[in-house]
Each structure stands twice: as C-alpha cells, then as structure tokens.
Amino acid sequence: MASIEFVRRLDGLVYHFDQDGTFNGRPSFKRTDLDVWCRWLPDRGWCTVDAAGVPNSAPLPGGTAGEPFPPLCAWRSWKAGKSYLYDLRRVDGEQPR
C-alpha cells in the first residue's frame, strides 16, 4: 500500500498516512494515528481534512492542486490559531496507486 508522510519543518515531527481507497476519483490517504485525511476536493484541490471534512492544510502556492497525487512540496497547516510548515514526501520513493 502506498504511503506519504508530512514532516514538520520546525522539529522534524512526522505524520504518516496510508492510502485508503479513493475520494472524488483520486487516491485518499488516512493518517495512521488520527481521523485525518489527505484528499482532493473539487473546490480546494489537495488538502488535509479532519473527521468532519474541514480542511486544515494545503500546499503552498506553486504546488499544483490539479495533480493526480498530493504534490511533493511545502504545505501549510492551520488549527486553533497555530500554523506550521510541512514537507510532503512519499515513503521509500513509492508512487501512490
């Protein structure tokens, strides 16, 4: 199964996501320790969403929202008045399915 990781630039904290089906015709990735998803939404492009479907991170401008997989670039999160920068990477260079 294909996996991706978000690596927080501030301290190297890693959030691991495994591919889990599709959503809106594109791969969907679920965080392994929490009900958070990395999904493509028609009105927003690629983003992470919480259990209620509320977006809480997205690629910075320059990442392409139309790619078939989450773009490997810097992402910014926002939640409860805090914001962090993350780098998205594919685990072991895998190509998501």
Image (tube, grey):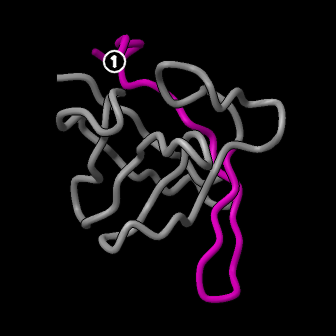
Quadrant, the C terminus: top left
Q: Nearer the viewer, residue 91 or 25?
A: 25
Left or right: 82 in relation to 28: right
Residue bearing mark 1: 96
Q: Nearer the viewer, residue 16 or 68?
A: 68
Please report the residue visible at 47 percent of the width from the left and 70 percent of the height from the top: 54
Q: List x then y, in percent, for residue 59.
A: 68, 43
Q: Nearer the viewer, residue 64 or 25?
A: 25
**Quadrant location of residue 22?**
top left
**Quadrant location of residue 79?**
bottom right
Does the magenta run of residues contain 23?
Answer: no
Circle 1 packing at 10 Å, graded few (<14), some (14-19), many (20+), is some
Please report the residue visible at 18 percent of the width from the left and 34 percent of the height from the top: 21
Q: Main secondary structure of the magenta part?
A: strand
- Residue extending farthest to the bottom is 80
Does the magenta run of residues contain 77?
Answer: yes
Highlighted magenta segment, given as a residue range: 75-97
